[in-house]
């Protein structure tokens, strides 16, 4: 194990070009052959399960998020968010020194946990650079799979953004019109190891006439229903603040069509409390992924927006990305 982790640290994120290369967000890599692939909104997984020996391995390549400003802070944040929260590892965490390549700083670590009465290993490799952080998480209950984990990680090449922090085309940084979204996947202990990860998507649409809509779609494979929040109202902008004033807000429960994330039949509707909130807002361009984010900041978390996701770089804030794939509403 020690030799493997040292190897991961030395060659992670610096591999050469391979056949059958894949890309997810900022990461280009070669996946293990014959493994099942599952793509979610915020990560892509590669899964191997041997029912005869009851052994398994899962490798998650995560979508990049906002950096906390240093590799030490990013690694610790990712460990707490991706490892501690989901696997409750023992306190024998092993860490290795920081390596640098092409403007990225990389740190790796590992720990042990128990799943279904068997000992298991979790490995985290985190890279920090260009205002972003990105991680790979691997979990397994069989050391034989570690060579495949090493093979994927050692093949990784990260995008090196251009020096310019903003695109050449002009963008109105004071306009919030358009569709803005947050997607969050369920990476709980049970979900990750059973391949049943769900997700929650939040979506603002700010119209140029001062009206807005807000939708939340929640899909969990272990639940027998889909949940949909529908909210509408008005908003006003004053300088760098925006006040959102809802007029109607409801939560709907829908059956699952074919037990999928597609809408079935409306089962129930209940009113949701109206939250009038004033946010401080800004638009930030992330050169690594070449996308603008809408940054909404408030003194406390709201029921509408959920937990903050801006990290220490955007304290007390939510980062909403451009809504490339809007929520499909039921007919």
Image (spheres, rainbow, N blue to C red):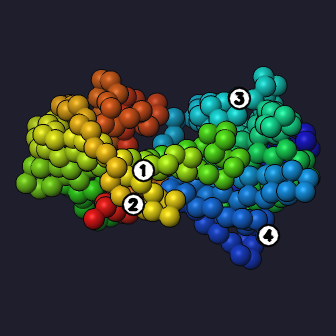
Sequence order check: which comes first, mark 3 or mark 2? 3
Sequence order check: which comes first, mark 1 or mark 3? 3
The residue tagged 1 is 226
Label 2 crowd bin: few (<14), some (14–19), many (20+), radius 10 Å: some
Q: In the image, what residue occupies the spot 52% across and 59% down?
A: 259
Sequence order check: which comes first, mark 2 or mark 1? 1
In the image, 8 versus 1, the foreground residue is 1
Sequence order check: which comes first, mark 4 or mark 1? 4
The residue tagged 4 is 33
The residue tagged 3 is 88
Q: Nearer the viewer, mark 1 or mark 3?
A: 1
Label 3 crowd bin: few (<14), some (14–19), many (20+), radius 10 Å: some
Sequence order check: which comes first, mark 4 or mark 3? 4
Tell me residue 68's x, y (percent): 51, 35
Tell me if label 3 and label 2 are in contact, CB under 8 Å: no
Q: Nearer the viewer, mark 2 or mark 1?
A: 2
């Amino acid at each position: 194990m020690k030799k493997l982790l040292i190897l991961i640290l030395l060659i992670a994120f610096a591999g050469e070009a391979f056949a059958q290369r894949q890309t997810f967000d900022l990461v280009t890599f070669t996946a293990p052959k014959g493994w099942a692939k599952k793509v979610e909104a915020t990560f892509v997984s590669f899964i191997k399960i041997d029912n005869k020996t009851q052994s398994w391995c899962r490798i998650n390549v995560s979508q990049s998020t906002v950096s906390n400003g240093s590799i030490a802070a990013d690694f610790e944040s990712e460990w707490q968010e991706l490892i501690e929260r989901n696997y409750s590892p023992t306190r024998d965490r092993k860490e290795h020194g920081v390596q640098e390549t092409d403007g990225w700083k990389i740190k790796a670590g590992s720990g042990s946990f128990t799943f279904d009465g068997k000992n298991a290993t979790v490995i985290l490799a985190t890279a920090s650079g260009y205002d972003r952080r990105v991680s790979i998480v691997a979990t397994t209950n069989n050391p034989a799979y570690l060579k495949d984990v090493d093979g994927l990680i050692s093949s990784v090449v990260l995008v090196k953004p251009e020096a310019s922090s903003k695109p050449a085309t002009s963008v109105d940084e004071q306009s919030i019109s358009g569709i803005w979204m947050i997607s969050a996947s369920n990476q709980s202990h049970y979900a990750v190891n059973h391949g049943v990860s769900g997700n929650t998507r939040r979506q603002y649409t700010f119209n140029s006439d001062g009206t807005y809509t807000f939708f939340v779609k929640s899909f969990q494979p272990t639940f027998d229903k889909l949940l949909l929040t529908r909210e509408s109202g008005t908003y006003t902008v004053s300088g760098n603040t925006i006040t959102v004033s809802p007029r109607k807000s409801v939560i709907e429960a829908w059956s699952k069509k074919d037990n999928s994330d597609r809408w079935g039949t409306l089962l129930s509707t209940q009113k949701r409390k109206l939250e009038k909130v004033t946010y401080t807002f800004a638009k930030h361009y992330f050169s690594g992924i070449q996308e603008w984010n809408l940054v909404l900041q408030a003194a406390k978390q709201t029921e509408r927006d959920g937990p903050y996701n801006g990290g220490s770089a955007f304290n007390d804030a939510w980062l909403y990305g451009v809504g490339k794939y809007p929520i499909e509403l039921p007919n």
